[in-house]
Image (tube, rainbow, N blue to C red):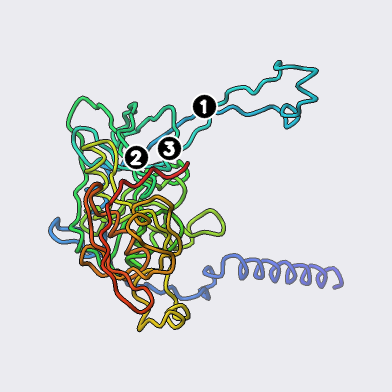
Amino acid sequence: MRRLWLIFAQTVTFCVAVLFVIQTLKPEWLGRGPARTVVAVQEAAPDAGTERKVVSYSNAAQKALPSVVHIFTSQEVKAPLSPLLNDPFFRHFFGDRFEAQPQRRSGLGSGVIVSGDGYILTNNHVVEAADEIEVALHDGRKLKAKVVGSDPDSDLAVVRINAGGKLPAITFATPESIRVGDVVLAIGNPFGVGQTVTSGIVSALGRSHLGINTFENFIQTDAAINPGNSGGALVDSNGNMVGINTAIFSQSGGSMGIGFAIPISLAKSIMEQIIKSGAVTRGWIGVEMQEITPELAESFGLPNTKGALIAGVMRGGPADRAGIRPGDILLMIAGKPVSNSQGMLELIAGLTPGSESQLKIRRDSKELDLPVAIAKRPKPRQ
């Protein structure tokens, strides 16, 4: 009897163990598994080739991409092996045997083909002081380039390549077409990773007083612009160029959503002068300007802050010869009102060197008209 009871107990234990394993691993064998629910999903209909239902800027990107190039530069510099080499005592004993050795320094940027015969618009800081310039085209070709001319005041330059055929030139947008809130695409070669398209909107227009260039009238955008994007194209949603990517505001070295581009109205004017004569000619009268703040306007007894304060006059310059003095308020140039110091700079720069222009100033609560002989603006110091 005891033997039969042990066999029964072992059989029950084995069956319970098998049931537990089945219940854990294969509950559907017992008909107790979770009920399967069939979910009906909606799938997009195949593209009929007429009108796409998704928002895409692919057409704009494909239109502009072939016109944006990569620019690689190199420059020979002499770097001393150690600061001790500049010590006269050290050089007295060792002479010039440890003279600084020439080294190559490389850089990268972007550019935009603006003419089918090889003219490329880029930033001056991309090609400045470069000994060799190589341009990589969208089709993979790499060609040597030469600088046609540059304008450090606006940070623009034109280089040219000989591709042996017609190149895909970018289409320029009309200057008045860009508005705050418009979608824009930034195209370039960020960090040298290859041609890249980023998107954003126009955040602001007419940005100035940033200390980037002498002449500033930037488009601000949140489209990602990073090192290597300089000189690339900022295009609208139709693939037309509205600006040249130039600079970013950043605390990390990368994009933080505040980028600046030179508007095509300014870039086109500079480009045409460089291609025509190899340089940009601007008017100059030899004064230093200062913004009129509300406090200055009150101290000078001015009704508003319009105009520009003459903070300094170069001795022997055109303004000095015309009788302009520090403390004068410049109100009008050639019949055009001066809104601020940046506007004054642009108005004078637009005058033809060698011509004479009328300047209206305020001095001691009196308005005076003074004729000034316009001179040629000197090149900025390196």
Q: Quadrant of residue 142?
A: top left
Is residue 198 positioned above or below 304 on the image? above
The label nearer to you, 2 versus 1, is 2
Q: Secondary structure at mark 1?
A: strand
Picture quarter with the N terminus: bottom right
Indicate which disc residue 128 carries.
Answer: 3
The one nearer the camera, 158 or 107, is 158
The one nearer the camera, 180 or 314, is 314
List the residue tagged with mark 1: 76
The one nearer the camera, 202 or 27, is 202
| Residue type indicated by callout 2 | Ser
What distance separates the C-alpha of mark 1 from that of mark 3? 13 Å
Q: Quadrant of residue 300?
A: bottom left
Q: Secondary structure at mark 3?
A: loop
What distance separates the C-alpha of mark 3 from that of mark 2? 8 Å
**Which residue is located at x 52 percent, y 26 percent?**
76
List the residue tagged with mark 2: 150
| Residue type indicated by callout 3 | Glu
Characterize the local packing of mark 1: few (<14), some (14-19) or many (20 or more) Cα atoms within 10 angstroms: some
Q: Earlier in the sequence, mark 1 or mark 3?
A: 1
**Which residue is located at x 75 percent, y 21 percent?**
91
User: Can residue 333 be seen at all in this image of the molecule?
Assistant: yes
Q: Earlier in the sequence, mark 3 or mark 2?
A: 3
Q: Are marks 2 and 1 in contact (CB under 8 Å)?
A: no
Give the image location of residue 163, x and y in percent.
24, 27
| Residue type indicated by callout 1 | Glu
